[in-house]
Structure formats: structure tokens, C-alpha cells
Image: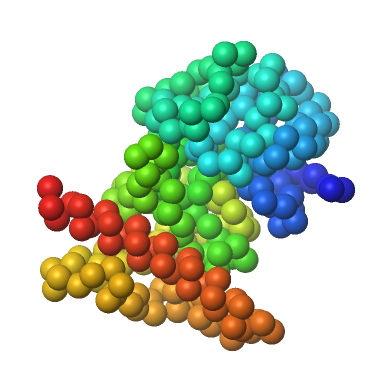
Amino acid sequence: MSLMFKLEKLSEHTAVDIATQMTTRSSVLGAISLGKYSIAIDSGNPLEIGQGFRKNLESYFNLPVRYLFLTHAHSDHRGGMNAFKDATLLLSQKCKENMPKSTSFSKWIIEPFVDKFVLEENNLSVEFHHVGGHSLGSSVVHVLNEGILYAGDLFFTEPINFGLPFLGFYQSNPRKTGNPEECLAAFHKFKSMKLDYIVPGHGEVVDNPQEYLDEQIEFFNSLKSFIISEIQENKTLEEIELPKIGQIEKAYQIIQTKSQKSKTLRFMDTMLNWIKKSFYEFYKESKST
């Protein structure tokens, strides 16, 4: 596999690699400089991706990598982590708990945090927040001075998954789908931040963060109201058909531009079924407790 890694500037002390995810089964890769050292945000997958990313990162900032931050435990974000074994592994406690049982931390220096962790160097402040939602351990990075939010898989933007959210694998053991309420709480939290860019876990960087967040909040609330109404009518998961609202409507419009419409539609149906299942299971369980 021949790969080209390319970190691109977001702000004076931040960068992002969007290109690598487009040709691999990996994620968006992020980087932060704190003057004396750098922070890698997710490692991608597999090990070859992590190795290439690290080499590119060290060349880009001309600094050693002190921290590898994992936004969550899914393999496309952590599969290359062994390329950073001499760095400190920074992750939420819930992310650590949600790792596969086969994951060994015996040779790692680990800095787990519960709700929030802060790094401050050279008048720069970087905050790490555990928010959940997409995954039990999902966390984000806010570079306060420069208005950058690395949001992991709280957000998928076009062209990935039609920009539709994915909440299919929240917890490994026992297996659970995502938590829409945690997503909504996180979106409102982000609204209070002064942001210039949101970096998603997959897709293109968001350059209109407040408008985008408003759209996501409206979309999630509309889905929430719809699913709760269907549950109250005692409908089964199979009887529910999601309405064409928000990003779902946009997804159908995107399909009309594709040459292989039937194949693309089948993929979108899979994505919609995961959304439906996630919302249904969460609010069905909430109703019964």
C-alpha cells in the first residue's frame, strides 16, 4: 500500500490530515503544537498509517511527539497506536474501559482522565473533554486560543456516510448502540465555545461551526421526537420508517447525483437503519426505566 500523508494547516499551532482517510479505512488525523512538543490526535489504522502519520507530524512541526490522544476506542482511530509507544497515551477513562480485552497497556505511559484534562504551554491552552455519544469513551480536543475543535466521530461530514451520524457501536461489552442524549449535550457544550473550525472524525473540516451545530441539534431533536412518538404508538423497530428530514433529505439528494444509484441507496439504507436502531434502542430503554 503506497500512502501519501499530508498535514495541512488549520491555524498557527494546529493541522489536519484529511486526505489519508479518503483512500484507506482510517480516520481524520490531527496535530497540535505546544511549542516544545506536539500532540497526535488519533493514530489511524493500521500500524502503517500510524507510522506514516508520525513521520509526517514530526516533520511538519519539527518537534517530538509527547502525547497520542485517542478520541475513542474504535479501531480506525487506534489501530496505528503502536507507532507512538514512546509517547504518553492520553484518553478518557471510559475510552480505556471500552478498549477490546486484547488491548495491552503494560508498556505504555497512560494519562487517563474522567471528565476533563488540560495542557498549557507557551500561553497556549488545550482542553480535552469526555462527552460520550458516539462511543462510551468519546472525547474531544478544544484548542482555546485558536478556535479549533477536534471532535472525533461525534461528527461525520460529507463526503463520508452522506454526512449522516453513526451511533452503531457505543459500548463493546455488553454491546450497545449510541447515546443521542449525550450527543445533544455535547453539541450544546460546543455551542458555548468560540470556534472557527470543527474537525470531524471522518469527512471534511467544518468552517461554519455555529450554523453546523444548529443543524445537528435540530436534526437530532427532530429524530428524537419522531422516534419517541413511534415508541408511544407501540411500533416495533421494523415498522418505523425514518422521515426525510435534515441530513437524511440531503443524503437522498446526493444519491440522485451518483451513477450507481442502486448500490449507493443500499449503502445509505444501511446507515439509516443504524440511526433508527440507535435512537430506537436508546429511547425504548429510557421509557422502560
Image coordinates of residue 236 in percent, x first then y, are 23, 70
Q: Nearer the viewer, residue 59 or 191?
A: 59
Residue 192 visible: no
Q: Residue at x 53, y 82 (%)?
A: 253
Q: Is residue 14 left or right of residue 172?
A: right
Image coordinates of residue 277 in percent, x first then y, are 35, 62
Q: Residue at x 12, y 48 (%)?
A: 289
Q: Residue at x 30, y 72 (%)?
A: 238
Q: Is residue 171 left or right of residue 282?
A: right
Q: Quadrant of residue 129?
A: top left
Q: How many marks?
A: 0
Q: Quadrant of residue 39?
A: top right
What colour-coding does the image apply?
rainbow
Image coordinates of residue 208 in percent, x first then y, are 53, 60
Image coordinates of residue 62 in percent, x first then y, are 81, 26
* 268 w.r.t. 132: above or below: below
Q: Nearer the viewer, residue 86 or 270?
A: 270
Q: Residue at x 66, y 82 (%)?
A: 260
Q: Quadrant of residue 172?
A: top left
Q: Is residue 132 left or right of residue 48?
A: left
Residue 216 visible: yes
* 261 w.r.t. 84: above or below: below
